[in-house]
Image: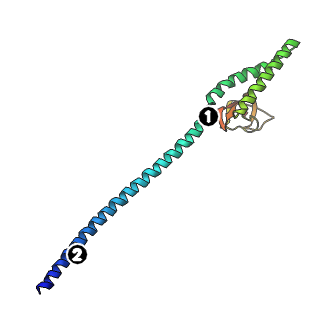
Amino acid sequence: MSEEKQNEEMLDENTQVLEEQNDELQKLQAQYDELKDTYLRANAEFENIKKRMEKEKISATIYANESFAKDLLDVVDALEAAVNVEANDEISLKIKEGVQNTLDLLLKKLEKHMVKPVEASGEFDPNLHEAMFHVESADHESGHIVALLQKGYMMNDRIIRSAKVSVAK
């Protein structure tokens, strides 16, 4: 019987060792799962940051010249005003022609860099236009643009200067 008792004690001892090893294995598995989850979250966050940085880089590249283009709009306004001045003599007509050529060249260069005028006719759009005042108009429906006071411009579908308009009441 002692041999049977010895076998039973060994079996109990082996069972206890297996249970301890199983507990340790479960703890290690839980630690592994936790670390894996932390790694996956950190990796996903890193990928999101990388994508965001890429978008910001593209946006910065596209709109890097926005401030410069905005400053040039004052030059365009001045040249357009010069072209609209009444010219009577031959010298004034030649100067006006030169100013028109300069204006055309400047507008082509701006267009090459995705700067284009905002359409300022039809219905008023607060995203594109700035209403300077409302006027009575028999020729226009309420909420439609009556007159353009200053041209607006956009760069890559982003407004850099709203068109200043008068709107029918």
Location of residue 105 (image quadrant) = top right
Which residue is located at x 74 percent, y 35 percent?
119
Task: Tell me if mark 2 has few (under 14), some (14-19) or many (20+) residues whose alpha carbon lies within 10 angstroms of its own.
Answer: few
Which residue is located at x 60 percent, y 32 percent?
64
**Secondary structure under the numbered disc 1 in the rendered image:** loop
Q: Position of residue 30 (x, y in %)?
A: 33, 62
Location of residue 115 (image quadrant) = top right
Residue to which mark 1 is pinned: 63
Which residue is located at x 84 percent, y 13 percent?
92
Q: Nearer the viewer, residue 5 or 77?
A: 5
Residue to which mark 2 is pinned: 15
Which of the two labelled residues, at mark 1 and mark 2, occupies the earlier sequence position?
2
- For the residue marked with disc 2, what is the amino acid? Thr
| Image side of residue 97 versus residue 114, left or right | right
Is 15 above or below relative to 143?
below
| Image side of residue 5 versus residue 44, left or right | left
Q: Position of residue 15 (x, y in %)?
A: 22, 75
